[in-house]
Amino acid sequence: MIKGNFIDNLPKVYGIYTGGFLAFIIIMSIAEQMGMTAKTIGICFVAFTVAIYAIIGYLSRTAQADAYYVAGRQVPTVFNGMATAADWMSGASFVAMAGGIYFKGYGYMALLVGWTGGYVLVASLLAPYLRKFGCYTVPDFIGTRYGGNLSRFMAVVVLTVASFTYVTAQINATGTIASVALDIPFQYAVYVGLVSILLCSMLGGMRGVTWTQVAQYIVLIIAYLLPVFWISNKMGAGFFPHFMLADEVSRIAELEAQFGFVKNSAENLKEVPKGLAGITKAHSAVNATPWAFISLALAMMMGTASLPHVMMRYFTTPSVKAARKSVGWSLFFIFLLYSSAPMLATLSKLSLIDPTLPTGIIGKSISEVQAIDWYQNWNQANLMFVSDFNGNGTLELNEFFMGGKAVVLATPEIAGLPYVISGLVAAGGMAAAMSTADGLILAIANAISHDVYYKIIDPKAETAKRLVVARVLLVVIGFAGATIAALEIQGILGSVIWAFDFAMSGLFFPLVLGVWWKRANKEGAIAGMFLGLVSGAAYLVWVRTGGSGFLGITQLTFGIFGSAVSLVAMVVVSLMTSAPSAATQRMVDEVRIPSGKSILGKQH
Amino acid sequence: MSKQEQHWEKSRGLLFMTLAIWFVFSIGIFLFGAEMNEVTGPFGYPLTYWFTCQGSLGAFVILIFWFANRQEKIDEEFGFSERGDD
């Protein structure tokens, strides 16, 4: 069926794959008509997709260092774009983002701007230059550009802190979805999720992760867009929701004015299960101060440019030119999902709160709402709650509570779509969380195996031994992440945002100035990474323990403080110590032009 | 000035232009979020709301491709582009 080189056949391979997946959805919907239970459908969706990823992971097995670390540097631009998009869009983007927009409206949408605008910084400041450098990992760049084991080691520390914070959230998300879809307790589901994640990356490293991420992107984008279009059409809101929801947005504003945002007393709120929220902020009106919005967006943008698992995706392209284009494609594929999240939030909110719609529940009597099928299901799953605070017998806007995940997971059911869509959404959420977790675990394991073990501890190690160490670390880090995830310390979204702040505190300026400021030297970089990370973390602890903070920097934007300290420390210390050697300066000159050999050899 | 210095000067100019456009769509317009939201934007959405869910995001996509093409031209002009094709 397929002749010749795998890379040349990519469009064909993934075309067949997409067709096969669509056929699977159709078969499942026929099975549903014939009486297959909802539970079996959920299991089929998750098991079928995970099995495919595992097969891809197995077929991508390798014993070569450059295939393991950078997928042999032959991933074409568009496919690298898809892989990056899957790498990027986590369980938080897929499951929690529309929910956040649903509850908080405009103020929350700073994340949409931040998580896309950061790619402009990636494309213009960093990715092409790091690709020219030819490194395997981000600390590889820091260690070679600035020189010395200490700078390399500091970069590994920052990378590990940021990525580990992030990965526990992703394993948590895979566990949540696996526990719902397979109907097993969360404590076990976390490990089921972990095994699925490791199946993709263990044998093939970056090569395995690349080709599974492309497959995961295809699943997650179908799983996100199909329900949005379907719901919009079913509600009669318009066949292309992105261009046609203006009436719905203004209708929500009208209803908000009519209902008003009644504040619940603390006593009443105690009744509400943990993690559920009501609608307390306007949907489309500007409800945040400019600085609150901009600071959050800025922190996310700078964090994007500092997160190693994203940056290392651009090490896999065949050329510098391809790395630049590939960033554009990545953002295009991300845009497809991010621009749909607000539309889903709008449709979901209107279908629940508009009393003139058959699905609307506000204004109905409490007992009537409590008798609805889907309400009972999601109430049982601890994601929905109503209570008659004012005792008038009807449900008011402030008496309805929902979990953030429910907006994506429950809306298809509320809108009356067949269960096959809910199964599809579960598979999509699983794909999103798995692909990000894979990228992160690989980033940490590669940094430790390549930069700490090979470059610092045992530079004479043979390739086979290096790759064994890399794989052992992969498993160890995965299990550590799963164990912490099983404790359920922090919500998914909170820890994701922290990861961005940690990364930007320690890495943003050492990376950017490494390319753009020749005078930056080793001492400056070490000071920048160390003081940036420490001051950022200290600020977080201070605010979390009741500190008031300053300049409106909150626990979600502490990276702004951390990176400012990092910049000052790096510039001051660099200028106080001697300029980098002539060889280093020549190296920076070399990095700035795309042609010629890369700084580090193909195998290093 | 050597060829390499000229190339870098032009690349830096392009960077500043790119960052200026990026600044407008990621920060600039949100300084005036409340005022701009009174205006009706594309497809009938309130203007600032539209920028947060479509406008700025789309602008970033276009900006990156535009930047990549311009940088390629600069590299070609000075003979620094890679020979192999992607």
Image: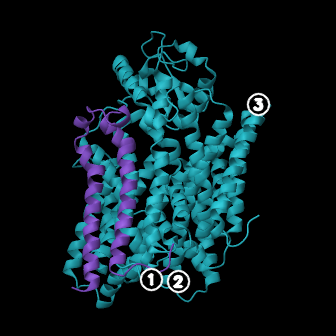
Where does residue A285 sit, x and y in percent of width and height?
31, 31
Where does residue A520 sit, x and y in percent of width and height?
27, 78
Residue at figure coordinates x 52%, y 57% from the top left: A167
Q: Amino acid at mark 3?
A: Gln
| Chain of the residue under label 3 | A
Q: How many marks?
A: 3
Location of residue A426 with respect to A433 vertically, above or below: above
Location of residue A420 with respect to A557 vertically, above or below: above
Q: Secondary structure at mark 1?
A: loop
| Chain of the residue under label 1 | A
Residue behind mark 1: A598
Q: Amino acid at mark 1?
A: Ser
Residue behind mark 3: A33
Where does residue A44 sit, x and y in percent of width and height?
74, 44
Q: How crowded is the residue under tag 2: few (<14 C-alpha within 10 Å), some, or many (20+)? A: some
| Chain of the residue under label 2 | A
* Marks 3 and 2 on same chain: yes
Q: Amino acid at mark 2?
A: Lys
Where does residue A541 sit, x and y in percent of width and height?
34, 53
Q: Secondary structure at mark 2?
A: loop
Spatial CA distance of label 3 from label 1 is: 58 Å
The hue in which chain B appears in the rendered picture of the protein: purple
- Asked which quadrant contains residue A592, the reply is bottom left
- Asked which quadrant contains residue B21, the reply is bottom left
Q: How crowded is the residue under tag 3: few (<14 C-alpha within 10 Å), some, or many (20+)? A: few
Residue behind mark 2: A602
Residue at figure coordinates x 68%, y 36% from the top left: A420
Asked whether, in this view, residue A295 is left or right of residue A56, the answer is left
Q: For residue A472, say whether it is visible.
A: no
Q: For residue A16, say whether it is visible.
A: yes
Spatial CA distance of label 2 from label 1 is: 8 Å
Q: Are marks 2 and 1 in contact (CB under 8 Å)?
A: yes
